[in-house]
Image (tube, rainbow, N blue to C red):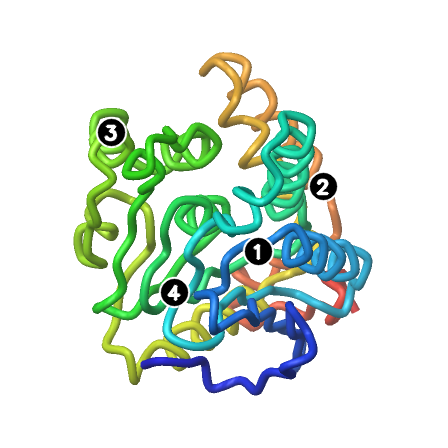
Amino acid sequence: MNAPTHTTDPDQLVCQERKGSVAYLTLNRPSHFNALSEEMLAALQAALDGIAADTSIRAVVLGGAGKAFCAGHDLKQMKANPSLEYYQRLFDDCSRMMLRIQALPQPVIARVHGIATAAGCQLVAMCDLAIAADDARFAVSGINVGLFCATPSVALARNVGRKAAFEMLVTGEFIDAPTAVQRGLINRCVAPDRLDAEIDRLAAAIVAKPASAIAEGKALFYRQLELGVAAAYRLAGQSMAEKMIDEVAQEGVAAFIGKRAPDWRPDGGKS
């Protein structure tokens, strides 16, 4: 599959569409394999900030137009601005955008086709979930031009095992989609013609759950990952105790006991 089924506007660097309560963001520099120029980073940051404030959006799908998901940073633009100040600002902007994905209350699903390299692979790793076409390929290939992919390594090492991540970083070699599944970089891969249907199925499963439980659970999930085991259990236990007395969980448990469907409002509360 060379392009998403969703339409794109050639005048927009990041196109946004809605399908029910799911937002679809499409990186839209197909002639540059959706390389993350500074303008693209700004456009994606703005789109994510808007989504964060929109409670009617329950899930986000992030894909790329054309033949690839994302080929990483725009090396031509970087080469044209050879100053430490410029590079520091560029990588700060990129890191802020990546962290925005994790801080977003809605789960973000990467829709991967073609290649995802360097910061493009980092983008996949920072998304909460990822589904790829089975012919997609992944690499952190900065080392091939003499630049260790330091910022992508942060996300990569939090997805795959340490040795597998380091091998990718020091060789710059591609891995295929089945290997990416095996290593934990993506959730699963499917035939290209099934990619959109599989993503829609996953998004629908998320949307069917209470919005508040998903948003609070996502925040808790990433917070506890950075803690020691004992502290993580304290945080998680307190969270479960607090949420158990909430009307959402009370309704869910009552529905389970009563062998009926839970009666949740679209915003995640109890009707």
Q: Which residue has dot 2 on it?
A: 245
Q: Which residue is mark 3?
A: 170
Residue 35 point in image, percent of width and height:
50, 58
Q: Does 230 sit above or below residue 142?
A: above
Mark 2: which amino acid?
A: Ile
Give the mark nearer the N terminus: 1 vs 3. Answer: 1
Question: Which residue sits at x=48%, y=32%?
Answer: 151
The vertical placement of 204 against 156, above or below, is: below
- The answer to whether the residue labelled 1 contacts the one labelled 3, judged by CB atoms less than 8 Å apart, is no
**Residue 134 vertical placement versus 149 (above, below):** below
| Mark 1: secondary structure | loop
Q: Which residue position is annotated with label 1?
A: 107
Instruction: Single out the mark in the foreground, 1 or 3.
Output: 3
How far apart marks 4 and 1 lie (CA) works out to 16 Å
Mark 4 — residue? 112
Q: Is residue 249 visible?
A: no
Instruction: Give the residue displayed 61% in from the left and 48% down from the top.
Output: 101
Q: Quadrant of residue 55?
A: bottom right
> Closer to the camera, 208 or 185?
185
Q: Tell me whether circle 3 and circle 4 mark residues in contact (CB < 8 Å).
A: no
Provide residue 47's location: percent of width, then percent of height: 72, 61
Towards the viewer: 125 or 21:
125
Secondary structure type for disc 2: loop
The tag earlier along the polypeptide, 4 or 1, is 1
In space, the residues marked 3 and 2 are separated at their CA atoms by: 49 Å
Nearer to us in this view, 8 or 270: 8
Quarter holding the C terminus is bottom right
Mark 3 lies on a secondary structure that is helix
Left or right of 6, for residue 178: left
What separation in Å lies between label 4 and label 2 (alpha carbons)? Answer: 39 Å
Image position, residue 118 (x, y; %): 39, 45
Kind of residue sitting beneath label 4: Val
